[in-house]
Image (spheres, rainbow, N blue to C red):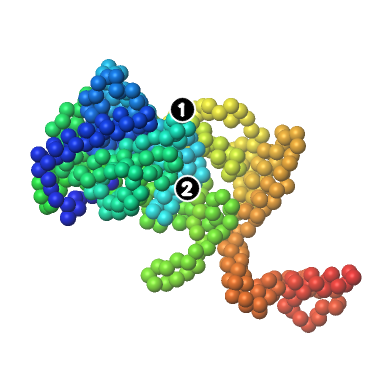
Amino acid sequence: MTEAQQPENKGQQTRTVAELVEDIQVLTTEIQELYCLDAIPWIIGVSWGKDSSTILQLVWNAIAALPPEKRTKTIHVITTDTQVENPIVAAWVRQSIKQLESAAKEKRMPIQAHLLHPVVEDTFWVNLIGKGYPAPRNQFRWCTPRLKINPANQFIREIVRANGETILVLGTRKAESAKRAATMKKHQASRVRERLSPNASLPNSLIYTPIEDWSNNDVWIYLNQSDNPWGHSNKKLFSLYRGATADNECPLVIDTTTPSCGDSRFGCWVCTLVNQDKSMQAMIQNDEEKEWMQPLLDIRNELDAEDDRDKRDFRRLHRGEVQLFERNKDGKVSVEPIPGPYTKYWREHWLRRLLEAQTKICQTAPENMRDITLISLEELSAIRRIWLEEKHEFDDSLPRIYQEVTGEEFKDPRPGADLSLLGSDEWTVLEEICAGNEMHLELMAKLLDTERQFRKMSRRVGIYESLEKCFATSSRSKDEAVKNAHLKRDLKTAVEQGDIEKVKQLTLADFVAPEEQTSTVDTQIDPADNTKTWANMKFKNKQTKN
């Protein structure tokens, strides 16, 4: 349930209840006509918050008023479970879906509910703990596409492939935010009819937004004055929003100075795209029975560090290279490495913190909430695979951490996961040999594990490329790698500017031969010159051989 609500637009006029009732009647007729117009299936995207609940209720009531013989077109109701939703909201969603399915079957409504999930490789914890992705920021908002957009788009594409096209019904409103209003206004220009717009990202699908002009006040009046047709309680939804408001108040808006619980935001409990998780804070503050969620809030706040560069690698994730950027802080410009993924220590730290929170919740939460799983067995298995096979961390620390925190043995569902030639004993020996040199340890671990991975192959095609990659990414210390990145950057700038002297200086004069080597160099090199460059040595030696 992700709905970031803002106060009502100052220029928006508050309409009377009679005007709202009239609009509902018009919308009911519009929904019925659009539904009966063709055989295009409908998909209603719901989060089970107030806006999407309003849409679903409007559509249900409109279709229920049609004769049974006209209810022939399937309406798919989809909800995406990010697996990091606020636990209270997640429980509400599961109960809502259960009641919707039961009521639709009983009343012969053409409605099918679908609870969608991201694939394991795209889940929040597999990316953050497994790959080391940093906590999401507006500059790197990696979570939304993986957790929400991709599962929904995949379902929509499947419906389009099966039927040719589809209509996506959404509860988006212009009053939600100025940005949302501007986006909706932009799409109005290409509409095929009123409130029906083409989907820019998904071909052959149209977007229908019946309550786009409704205010927060309209939504709450409708929900509180209309019975929920599938048996759920709108008053409980109202209480849920009220409990997520700091002052425990949720009045209806009667003028522009009256606050609305529409400002409450329900979403992922790990979300670091907002300054604070005010809804969870308010829930804990307003209800002693919800204090068991405090460990979740603590993890979320720890993830939301203002500066986490000390927790992250100096290299980017995929290429393992140092990339530079210009940083302007307090008017001072500096060129610094772009921080990469979380280091091994911090990935293990977040895993331990998460398992500790899950263990504590199982002990302190109410009976009906103690079965909460913060991280699934499949996610843990995927994280373990990434650490072992992609990051070459063959000490295999995940099972050990799991047993230390939970007191239970970790049973990996992945076939052959426990078969390995290298383990924690070999890692310990390697740590002793490398004597605290982290880069040396990383390089040796990568080389050994790369050889292990190719060991059972009948044709070891690609092993040399893999070994070269190990050296390319892990053979330099942090200072050396950063210096090399600056050299490349300066060289590129010099080439772009056509500065030939600078190019010569960077490519030929930066490699000084060691003194012990100068005495053994061919006699054609002037022995009085104590600053022989690598380039001169190479060229002179080549001439000597000729």
- Position of residue 218 measured from the top left corner of the image (x, y, whole percent): 16, 41
Residue 13 seen in the figure:
yes
Q: Residue furthest bottom?
A: 528
Residue 91 seen in the figure:
no
Q: Is residue 316 left or right of residue 475?
A: left
| Residue 408: assigned label | 1
- Position of residue 93 measured from the top left corner of the image (x, y, whole percent): 30, 31
Q: Is residue 257 left or right of residue 311?
A: left
**Closest to the observer: 294 or 103?**
103
Residue 30 drawn above or below residue 111: below
Q: Residue furthest top?
A: 106
At label 2, the amino acid type is Tyr
Where is the N terminus found, in terms of image quarters?
A: top left
At label 1, the amino acid type is Glu
- Position of residue 522 measured from the top left corner of the image (x, y, whole percent): 85, 74
- Position of residue 276 measured from the top left corner of the image (x, y, whole percent): 29, 49
| Residue 131: assigned label | none
Q: Nearer the viewer, mark 2 or mark 1?
A: 2
Q: What residue lies at 63% left-to-right and 30% top-to-bottom?
A: 419
Q: What residue lies at 24% left-to-right and 24% top-to-bottom?
A: 66
Q: Is residue 254 left or right of residue 78?
A: left
Q: What residue lies at 58% left-to-right and 56% top-to-bottom?
A: 321
Q: Are marks 2 and 1 in contact (CB under 8 Å)?
A: no
Sequence-first disc among 2 and 1: 2
The local crowd at label 1, few if under 14, some if 14 to 19, many if 20 or more residues have their Cα within 10 Å, is few
Residue annotated with mark 2:
133
**Closest to the observer: 47 or 529?**
47
Q: What residue lies at 51% left-to-right and 54% top-to-bottom?
A: 340
